[in-house]
Amino acid sequence: MLHSYECQVDKVEKREEGMTATVSEKILGFPPPVAESIVGAEGGLRQVWDAVRVVAPTDAAVLIEGETGTGKELIARAIHDRSPRRHGPYVKVNCAAIPAGLLESELFGHERGAFTGALNQTTGRFQLADRGTLFLDEVGDLPLELQPKLLRVLQEQEFERLGSPRTIRVNVRVVAATNVDLLEMVRERQFRADLYYRLNVFPIALPPLRERAEDMADLVWHFVQKFAARMNRNIEVIPEEVMETLQAYDWPGNIRELQNLIERAVILSEGRVLRAPLGELRAMARSTEPAAARTLAEAERDHIVEVLQHSGGVISGRHGAAARLGVKRTTLQYRMRKLGIEQRRVFVEAESA
């Protein structure tokens, strides 16, 4: 039997003003671009939104912690959009996506001739973010040798470009995010303690999707409507079996993994009923069932290897392992290095299976 899950009405009319405002905007006071992109402000993310409301009007540094795919960038953007800096620039840097040797130039800029290949003067991200917000994603990947310079900018709001003696002063708020335990990295001397405490003025912890059961139906409908509109589909019904399977799954890739699966489901759905690849999801669920003697790292390693084998050892692309896991390619490569997974060996094992 098919059951249609009703989509929440997310707009109310302000007839007396002739305007339309979202429910989230009316209740929470968030600007429409942020409110409309977040699901769960009234559910599993209520504490997170309370924290955003408190810290956004200040200039305090914020550290957003959460697993990969939980929506850390959306929260960073929400902080900026609700702050006095909302009319200033919002600049993003993914510390894991930029080679360590280029990250200093990317953050602080360089002068012409500062190093081989520096043919022109370049403005760094800190200067571009002046009077606005700089979002440092995957800050745990910041090289140790660069951390003192970042600490100085946070404390003094000044720096020098590579190859220049001139000090540049800026007015930048920093919001950082990480999916690793920075405090553990501090204990292992992989991250400076003084930088950690400077970034961790106001921590915000994002819950993983498996802890947001009350938001699942809303999230599923949100992504179904998003992709159906993009593909000019008219999907009105989600079978009860589909919804129950989605709710029972642990979602190690969190929101990003759910979004990718719903996109595939919409592609497969030619009529008004959502057709989700449940067999794939159940196979993934079986591969992640915890064994009594396995550590968390072993379980993660086994899961990644399983997905790599299903993708033929391919990491990138629409059907690669990163897309199946709902994570960025650089994040998957980092976890593979951390867990000692060799792509070549996985590919050989996949071919011989």
Image (tube, rainbow, N blue to C red):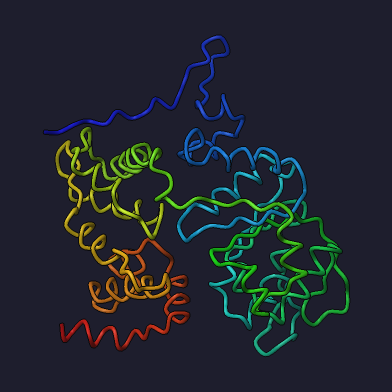
Which residue is painted at 50% across and 25% down in the image? 23
Q: Quadrant of residue 348?
A: bottom left
Quadrant housing the C terminus: bottom left
In the displayed structure, 297 sits above or below 36; it is: below
Which residue is painted at 77% across and 79% down in the image? 162
In the displayed structure, 93 sits above or below 216; it is: below
Across the whole image, how many numbered discs are drawn on residues? Answer: 0
Quadrant housing the N terminus: top left
Query: Residue 301 vs residue 121: left or right?
Result: left
Q: Residue furthest top?
A: 16
Which residue is painted at 35% across and 43% down in the image? 223
Name the spot of residue 63 as percent of width and height, x first: 65, 57
Q: Quadrant of residue 324?
A: bottom left
Camera-side residue of 182 and 130: 182
Q: Residue furthest front?
A: 292
Query: Residue 112 vs residue 326: left or right?
Result: right
Name the spot of residue 122 as percent of width and height, x first: 71, 72
Name the spot of residue 276 as percent of width and height, x first: 20, 49
In the displayed structure, 165 sits above or below 17; it is: below
In the displayed structure, 158 sits above or below 4; it is: below
Query: Residue 113 vs residue 256: left or right?
Result: right
Name the spot of residue 51 as percent of width and height, x first: 64, 42
Query: Residue 110 vs residue 353: left or right?
Result: right
Q: Quadrant of residue 62?
A: bottom right
Which residue is painted at 71% across and 47% down in the image? 88
